[in-house]
Amino acid sequence: MAQTFHCPYCRGILNVEGKIVFSVKTKNGVRGLIFLSPELGNYQTITNPFFKVKEGELHHYLCPICHSNLAALEINQNLVKVILTDENKKVSEILFSGIAGEHCTYKLREEELEIFGDDADNYQNFFGEGPKF
Ligand SMILES: [Zn+2]
């Protein structure tokens, strides 16, 4: 069994056929579906051409199963949180930016933080004390 991405609220599985599926809402309240890559640090997205994602704008990510808002309010309202269970059944929290075009992903497991993406510096300070470079 490969890795699975779960909603933190209903535990529903969000990955289907090599993509992670979310229901999203734009700032103007337009709703649509977005497919993301399950590969951390890969920011390719797929949407229907009728659903326009505006670069630089915060999108609200909702669980497509229970419709909970996935914003990680305890860390930063721009970040979206899902749960990853890997091949070895190890569980991590995955956080990524809900701002279209902002490339940062954080993988948190116990005390360990792994970061991905060119914009990872933008929120790193929200993850408690870490080494400052
Ligand atoms: Zn859910």
Image (spheres, rainbow, N blue to C red):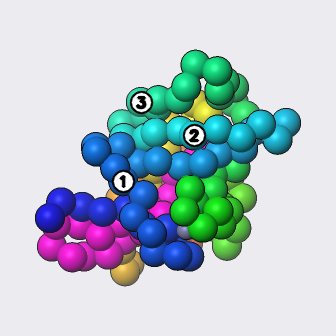
Residue wearing tag 2: 33
Give the number of the disc on residue 15.
Answer: 1
Judging depth in this view, the residue of 92 and 120 nearest the camera is 92
The residue shown at (47%, 29%) is 46
The residue shown at (65%, 66%) is 68
Up the image or down, 43 lies above or below 110; here it is: above
Q: Position of residue 41 (x, y in %)?
A: 36, 41
Residue wearing tag 3: 44
Tell me the kind of residue under disc 1. Asn
Tell me the kind of residue under disc 2. Leu
Measured Cα–Cα span from mark 1 to mark 2: 13 Å
Within 10 Å of disc 3 (Cα), the crowding (few <14, some 14-19, many 20+) is few
Highlighted magenta segment, given as a residue range:
81-98
The residue shown at (65%, 26%) is 51
Q: Is residue 36 magenta?
A: no
Up the image or down, 80 lies above or below 91; here it is: above
Q: Position of residue 72 (x, y in %)?
A: 63, 65
Within 10 Å of disc 2 (Cα), the crowding (few <14, some 14-19, many 20+) is some
